[in-house]
Image (cartoon, rainbow, N blue to C red):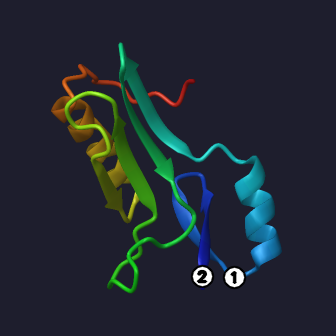
Amino acid sequence: MINYILDGKNIVECDDMLKWSAWFEKVDRRVAKTEKNDIRVSTVFLGVDHSFGGDVPLLFETMIFGGEHDGDQWRYTTWEDAEKGHLEACSLAGLEHSVLSKEE
């Protein structure tokens, strides 16, 4: 199994499990988070391919928590696609969001 780390917004394969786990433990993997009232949209870097044998690795995930779309999720290959998907999920969830934020 190949794991992945980030160098800025760039994805880097990492076949050293100790290096990967040390990186994974301390890094902020959040791409963006948007929250209003009881609805939250979160987009993160997964560090592990979630394509389950697909042609391209799926390394980022957006999820909606709360509201009508609670539990909806999407996965992406690149940071840029994840940012775009985050904004689309915010729109779907009814959250006005024009600026990406990593803040808590």
List the single residue furthest toward the top.
Answer: 37
Q: Earlier in the sequence, mark 1 or mark 2?
A: 2
Q: Are marks 1 and 2 in contact (CB under 8 Å)?
A: yes
- Alpha carbons under labels 1 and 2: distance apart: 5 Å
Q: Is residue 59 visible?
A: yes
SS at mark 1? loop
Question: Which quarter shows the C terminus?
Answer: top right
Question: Badge 1 local density, few (<14 within 10 Å), some, or many (20+)?
Answer: few
Question: Which quarter shows the N terminus?
Answer: bottom right
* Residue 71 position within the rendered picture, expressed as x and y whole percent measured from the top left: 32, 44
Query: Quick check: 58 above or below 94?
Result: below
| Res. 15 mark | 1
Nearer the observer, 46 or 15: 46
Query: Quick check: 83 above or below 12?
Result: above
Query: Quick check: 15 above or below 44?
Result: below
Residue at x 43% of width, y 43% of height: 43
* Residue 13 position within the rendered picture, expressed as x and y whole percent measured from the top left: 60, 76
User: Of the residues shown, which amino acid type is indicated by label 1?
Assistant: Asp
* Residue 9 position within the rendered picture, expressed as x and y whole percent measured from the top left: 52, 53
Residue at x 82% of width, y 72% of height: 18
SS at mark 2? loop
